[in-house]
Amino acid sequence: MSCQFVALFLLSFSALLGFTQDPALASTLKSEQCAHRAVARMTSANQEVMSRDARLLKTAYPEVKKIYKGTEFGNSDSDACEVLTSAWSVLRVSKPNAQLTLVDLTTASESYGGLHITSVPSGARIYVDDGLWNDLTDAKAVSHAGLRTVRLSMEGYDDAVGQVVIGQGKWAEFHRELKKK
């Protein structure tokens, strides 16, 4: 393990615990952590693209924080990182080897909100626009703003389907009481 990795890990850990008093250093560490999390989620045979994207993500993180400053969603570090990661993933899938710019990434990051999905009983599988979420109800995640179709599915219960509008920079709630078959 390299000394640089150990130093970054210790600084990151101290920032997470609130031991870092320097706001600029804390912001830099959060940008580093977010970029690392994003790149870890997606693999590419082209290491040059991934390395360039990691640098871009570090630069874009503070810009995404500015976009969502003062909104009910997106202003926390984890929300901003999730928005940035999601926007980058969508861009990277649509443009696998293109050289992305800061404008590309910040523009793609502008149209997100949060979706909180609950059910009684909890533990239902969640499908948003027919895409399966990793989590079961009760769950929160970032989502593109706009009209979304949600389906909850649990063995022994009828599927519950409905729509929810997610506003940019806002949390939307979706709740259903599942009915036994």
Image: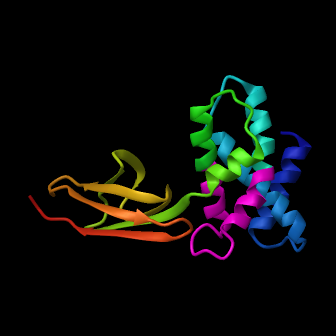
Q: Residue at x 41, y 50 (%)?
A: 133
Q: Which residue is drawn at 40% across and 64% down?
A: 165
Q: Residue 90: percent from the left, percent from the top? A: 57, 41
172 sits to left or right of 175: right
> Quarter of the image containing the C terminus?
bottom left
Residue 36 visible? The answer is no
8 sits to left or right of 104: right
Q: Which residue is drawn at 88% across and 52% down?
A: 7
Which quarter of the picture shows residue 172?
A: bottom left
Single out the residue that lies furthest toward the top: 45
Q: Residue 159: percent from the left, percent from the top? A: 19, 55
How many numbered markers are drawn?
A: 0
What residue span does the magenta drawing correspond to? Answer: 59-85
Q: Which residue is drawn at 29% across and 58% down?
A: 124
Q: Is the magenta stretch mostly helix, strand or loop?
A: helix
In the rendered view, tell whether residue 131 sits above or below residue 21: above
Front position in the image: 83 or 78:
83
Q: Is residue 125 magenta?
A: no
